[in-house]
Image (tube, rainbow, N blue to C red):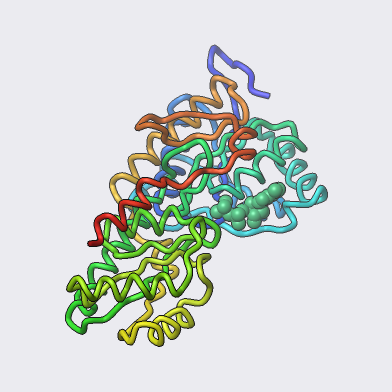
Amino acid sequence: MSHYARGRIVMNIAVVTSGGDAPGMNAAIRAVVRAASGQGLRVIGVEKGFLGLIENLFRPLTPRDVSGIINTGGSILKSSRCDLFKTPEGLEKASENLKSWKVDWVIALGGDGSMRGALSLSKVSGIPVTVIASSIDNDIAGIDETIGFDSAVNTAVEAIDKIRDTAVTYDRVFIVEVMGRNRGFLALEVALASGAEFAVIPEHRISIEEIGKRIRQMGEIGKKSSIIVKAEGAMGDPFQMASQLRRLTGYDLRVTVLGYIQRGGVPTARSRNLACLFGNHAVKLAIEGKKNRLVGLKDGKVVDLDIEESCSSIKKIDEDKYELVSILAV
Ligand code: ADP
């Protein structure tokens, strides 16, 4: 555990990026390394996410190692999905490696899954963790915003602005599929910001007939083109959906799947600033000894919440926002 030497706290912090990458993760790594270094703490980077904890892929990080990354997407530490980490053997091995590097505290950057992984790690190893909410899905319970969400929303909206030009010119209906296998936070935010006519999200079941009816109604009020923003986890295959709607409405439908362009790219100023604030806050929690907290944004403020509590709750979709998409589509 941490101890004091000549009046200063001595501590080794391991930092790891896990799960889906999100723009701003690098800015957060930079913030952790530099905020920690300012307090005389050492930071050790773990490569390839939780897999790197198991495979002992550790390397010390200095403030110079994190130069020039505040404006880059992805993660300089790399990331992974790691099923072995869900097993007792994987967690034991990770715990052994952390102890051999004399790690006192783990800061993990990731989404909902990574938060669960970090909590399991802390239970098995006894080493405290802090999770910095970083995910384009923005589906972590208890907080309003994660690092990277704003960047992904902006990327998708920019793409839809371009798609709309063709939709209007050709009187077409476009289905634009955005990421979100289980939750529709990204799709909803993107639908509202791009002025889409429909948000199709996993939280709200809607029949294909109903969508077809609404497309025809749009036509009757003079809207010859529409944008349907669909989360990947809602209503199955978008190409099948398009051919069904073609049959039901007689409209010319096209599909664009935005895919991985939403995960990468230059982080927005908002994502970078959240990264700076969250990274600094995470280091503060380690210095204060406040264990197993999730760092995120809530009601406009940086907060830290009990990880266990967040893991046992489900984030609710904003129903007013969902309604507003339809209200403004007339
Ligand atoms: P994200 O963090 O972006 O939501 P995932 O859901 O893929 O991404 O989770 C990232 C990793 O976290 C998984 O590949 C796995 O290694 C780990 N993980 C997820 N859930 C658990 C769990 N219940 N126990 C241990 N590890 C987990």
Task: Mark yes or no: residue 50 visible.
Answer: no
* Along the viewing direction, whichever of 17 and 172 lies nearer the viewer: 172
As displayed, is residue 166 above or below residue 201?
below
Q: Residue at x 78, y 47 (%)?
A: 93
Q: Residue extending furthest right? A: 89
Can the viewer see residue 287 in this picture? Answer: yes
Q: Nearer the viewer, residue 162 or 241?
A: 241
Q: Indicate left or right for 222 with 59 as reference.
A: left
Q: Image check: 36 left or right of 326?
A: right
Quarter of the image with the C terminus in it: bottom left
> x%, y% of residue 234?
50, 66
* Residue reaching furthest to the top: 7
Above or below for 152 versus 111: below
Residue sitting nearer the eye, 127 or 9: 127
Percent x, y of residue 111? 54, 48
**How many numbered discs, if any?**
0
Q: Residue at x 62, y 33 (%)?
A: 309
Residue 262: x %, y % from top left: 40, 63
Task: Give the side of residue 170 with respect to residue 30, left or right.
Answer: left
Q: Residue at x 55, y 33 (%)?
A: 42
**Residue 112 placement, left or right of 218:** right
User: Dividing the image into 4 quarters, which one contains the N terminus?
Assistant: top right
Quadrant of residue 259 within the rendered picture: bottom left
In this rendering, is residue 155 above or below 305? below
Where is residue 77? Give x, y as percent: 52, 53
